[in-house]
Amino acid sequence: MDLFSFANQTLIEENAPLAVRMRPRSLNEIHGQDEIVGQQGFLRRMIESDNIPSMILFGPPGTGKTTLAQVIASSTGCHFEKLNAVESGISDIRKTVEAARERIKLYGKRTILFIDEIHRFNKTQQDTLLPYVEDGRLILIGATTENPYFEVNLPLLSRVRVIRLKPIGKSSMLAIIKQALIDEERGVGKLAINYDDSVLEKIVDLSHGDARISLNIVEQAAILLQAENKRNLTEDILETVIGEKVLAYDKKGDNHYDTLETVIGEKILAYDKKGDNHYDVVSAFIKSMRGSDPDAAIHYLARMLAAGEDLNFIARRIIICAAEDVGNADPQALVIAVAAANAARHLGLPEARIPLAQAVLYISTAPKSNAAYAAIDNALADIKNKDCGQVPHHLRDAHYHGAREIGHGADYLYPHNYENNYIFQQYLPDTLRNTVYYRPTSNGKEKEIFSRLAHLKK
């Protein structure tokens, strides 16, 4: 970097927003994520042993995903590359990979590729990353506010570690704000601002666990104090910055995020206008369908649609609920959920709201059973935790040459040769004989299934 470029970079850093200037430069400066980067945190131990896995950082805005990725890179001496999934494509990935290959060949230096909003990469783009993550050419760190178990392809997900970052707690947020107020190099310490802890606590309440918001409020307040040649940070100053009475502020009220839009410079999703975050609304949506409350379910659907939530995300939640919570009590629920998802993709908004609403109301009012969900999870638990034994010989494939000579298919009874197309024989392995996974309820269609199985067992 030449002297002109260095001076220009320094000028940019000095004039960057406070939230950018105060970004932690080391693990010790990171607040609120002690479980993963504290003295006993597993990620700190992996960094200190120079054994960095590819990972996806998952958490709400302002919890430090980008910052953590940069600190990891600087702590390990790796080269740091950043892509934004909204703006980047496969060609950008391949250019980065080629540069990483040259870097490790010429300088022995690994590359950390940080992809912000990785959930916005489509399946093809995500699949492009697979071979490079697998062979170690790249250490991938993805960041997302969406649940990666829903938004990231399973092949990629199986090759990374998912790390959940929590909203920053009150004590940690106070520490971040106080550091910004006293830091003379990167913060606003040169202004010698006076404050009471009660005022800082109101900033913490307004920030809702988002460090970026809290530092933006501090910065706006500092600018106002400097303009008015004042040094005391008071509630009156906060009221001027936020635009409404702080004392009237209600964290569960409609004004919670509306008043912050001018401070943080962006529109807040409708999820949060009643004090709920994204995950809470999605959770309430599913639980309302499961709990057979059509009015609540349609209300939370409306919140997600008004917030601009991705239609595919909503449709997947509906399909999951139809299979998990209605199941065979009304098999038609899954058919309607899948049809609604296809219709929504075909129509787009605003018309997509109608088939989605139809499916939500059908599922909400349908009889409920989680027997299918319980059956597969119990079976998977046995596969994971038990020696499940071998497939019984009479059920083994007997179609290839020599199979019958080794006992495959011997004594198998063909059900269609018997009355009611049924004949009792053992299907489970010997070690699981008489195990019951599927326990149909007495609700809806499953009542008939229960009666038929009971009749067959007699």
Image: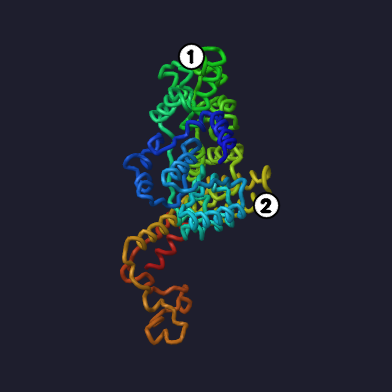
In the picture, residue 450 is in which quadrant?
A: bottom left
Q: Residue at x 53, y 30 (%)?
A: 274
On the image, the x and y values in percent for residue 52 come to 41, 50
Of 142 and 289, the residue lying toward us: 142
- Image location of residue 148, percent across then percent down: 49, 49
Q: What sort of colour scheme is used for the picture? A: rainbow
Q: Secondary structure at mark 2?
A: helix
Q: On the image, numbered disc 2 is attached to which residue? A: 346
Residue flagged by tag 1: what amino acid is it?
Arg
Residue 384: give its label: none
Q: Secondary structure at mark 1?
A: loop
Q: Which amino acid, by three-letter code, is at mark 2?
A: His
Q: Which residue is mark 1?
A: 231
Residue at the front extreme, as displayed = 3
> From the viewer's perspective, is the residue at label 1 or at label 2 nearer?
1
- The N terminus sits in image quarter: top right
Q: Residue at x 45, y 19 (%)?
A: 199
At 55% from the left and 58% from the top, the residue drawn is 127
Q: Residues within 10 Å of mark 2 (few under 14, many from 20)?
A: few
First of labels 1, 2 by sequence position = 1
Task: Say few, some or many: other residues with alpha carbon within 10 Å of mark 1 (under 14 / 14 to 19 / 20 or more).
Answer: some
Q: CA distance from mark 1 to mark 2?
A: 58 Å
Instruction: Report the residue that reaches farthest toward the top.
Output: 229
Of 3 and 270, which appears nearest the observer? Answer: 3
Q: How far across and how far down the image is residue 276, in percent?
A: 50, 34
Quarter of the image with the C terminus is bottom left
Residue situated in front as seen by the camera: 328 or 249: 249
